[in-house]
Amino acid sequence: MMQGHGAINILMAEDDADDRVLFADAFRDSGVEVALDFVGDGVELLQRLQGLLDDRASALPELLLLDLNMPRMDGREALRAIREHAGLKHLPVIMMTTSSSRLDIMVSYQLGANSYVTKPRRYDELIAVLQSLEHYWMETVQLPVAGPAGGA
């Protein structure tokens, strides 16, 4: 489906193990071609991203899915750190959370989120959301060029 791209590399920060399984299953069932990896919180997310930056042969993910409420470092704090980091600030970040609070939505955009999606309650709705994300992020918009971290 993607324009000569292959699987898109997505890193998802999600502390709930059941939600990680749910998202992995939903991506598979949606037909969206992704290389999906998970971290458990914002601290682990930033460590993973910094490790990818330090290893010049590794590519950063093309898209980050970020849960809002996580232990140690929540999605807001992680997003702020990403937007303040010269090597990471270009990464597209989608907040993917159960919260539909107007304040959470406003703060997320103020901190530099590219999108804010409330997790659907039903599995078929989740699949539809993932398919719409595929259409928008993988077919409609141009993502920053993927390649080794820190590369040209």
Image: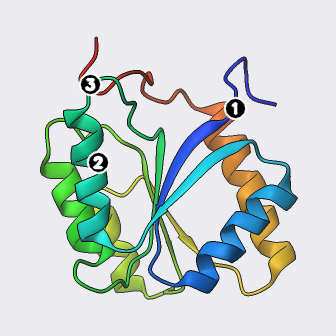
Identify the secondary structure beneath mark 2. Answer: helix
2 or 3: tag closer to the N-terminus: 2
Residue under circle 2? 49
The answer to whether residue 80 is above or below residue 70 is: above
Q: Nearer the viewer, residue 38 or 5?
A: 38
Residue 24 spot, x, y in % from top left: 69, 64
Residue type indicated by callout 3: Arg
Q: Within the image, what quadrant is residue 125 found in? A: bottom right
**Distance between mark 2 and mark 1 Cα atoms:** 25 Å
**Distance between mark 2 and mark 3 Cα atoms:** 12 Å
Residue drawn at (33%, 69%) of the image: 108
Identify the secondary structure beneath mark 1. Answer: helix
From where the camera sits, is residue 111 visible?
Answer: no
Residue type indicated by callout 1: Glu
Looking at the image, residue 59 sits to the left or right of residue 130; the answer is: left
Q: Nearer the viewer, residue 140 or 22?
A: 22
Residue type indicated by callout 2: Leu
Looking at the image, residue 8 sits to the left or right of residue 85; the answer is: right
2 or 1: tag closer to the N-terminus: 2
Residue drawn at (77%, 66%) of the image: 26
Identify the secondary structure beneath mark 3. Answer: loop
Residue 56 circle label: 3
Q: Nearer the viewer, mark 2 or mark 1?
A: 2
Q: Nearer the viewer, mark 1 or mark 3?
A: 3
Residue 91 spot, x, y in % from top left: 36, 42
Residue under circle 1? 139
Residue drawn at (20%, 71%) of the image: 77
Q: Within the image, what quadrant is residue 106 found in? A: bottom left
Q: Within the image, what quadrant is residue 138 found in? A: top right
**Distance between mark 1 and mark 3 Cα atoms:** 27 Å
Looking at the image, residue 1 sits to the left or right of residue 9; the answer is: right
